[in-house]
Image (spheres, grey):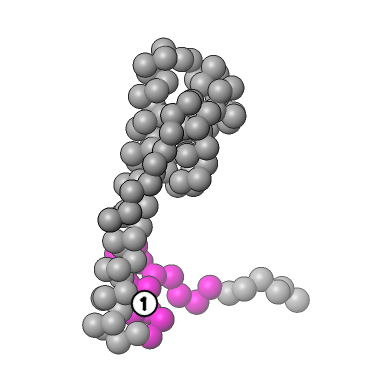
Amino acid sequence: MNSEPVITHVTPVDGNVFADLGFEATEASKLLAETDAIISAKLSIKHFLMTELAEWMQEKNLQQVDAAAILGIPPPRVSDLINRKSVKFTIDALIDMLARTGKQVQVLIR
């Protein structure tokens, strides 16, 4: 007897998961727009932090292995950082890495 869950529906990439969950069309559209805005804001923060780290490496003329030792991550993760693979890093991890470079991160809430 197989106890694996059976997937009966997959929301397409351009679909609306809220509509699939049964929300009315207007509410589903509103929820999707709000969620997209939150995700976009978080990705923007990650991109900014990753850019700061990549520029720091360039300014210091560091090889990936040397940067990895300072940042406290394995060398392959430095490549992910340079290539802005934001899904592989949390904002917290990026802030910690920036702190290891001697940079301070300040948060401004508007």
Front-most of residues 13 and 60: 60
Image point (47%, 32%), residue name: 98
Image coordinates of residue 58 in percent, x first then y, are: 37, 18
Q: Nearer the viewer, residue 15 or 18?
A: 18
Mark 1 lies on a secondary structure that is helix
Q: Quadrant of residue 71?
A: top right
Residue where numbered disc 1 is placed: 18
Question: Could you tell me which residue is drawn at 48 percent across and 15 percent down?
Answer: 63
What crowding class fits label 1: few (fewer than 14 Cα within 10 Å), some (14-19), or many (20 or more)?
A: some
In the rendered image of this protein, does residue 5 appear above or below residue 25? above
Q: Is residue 26 above or below residue 108?
A: below
Nearest the camera: 65 or 102? 102
Magenta stretch prevailing secondary structure: loop
Q: Quadrant of residue 9?
A: bottom left
Horizontal relation, residue 88 to residue 59: left or right: right
Q: Quadrant of residue 59?
A: top left
Range shown magenta: 7-22
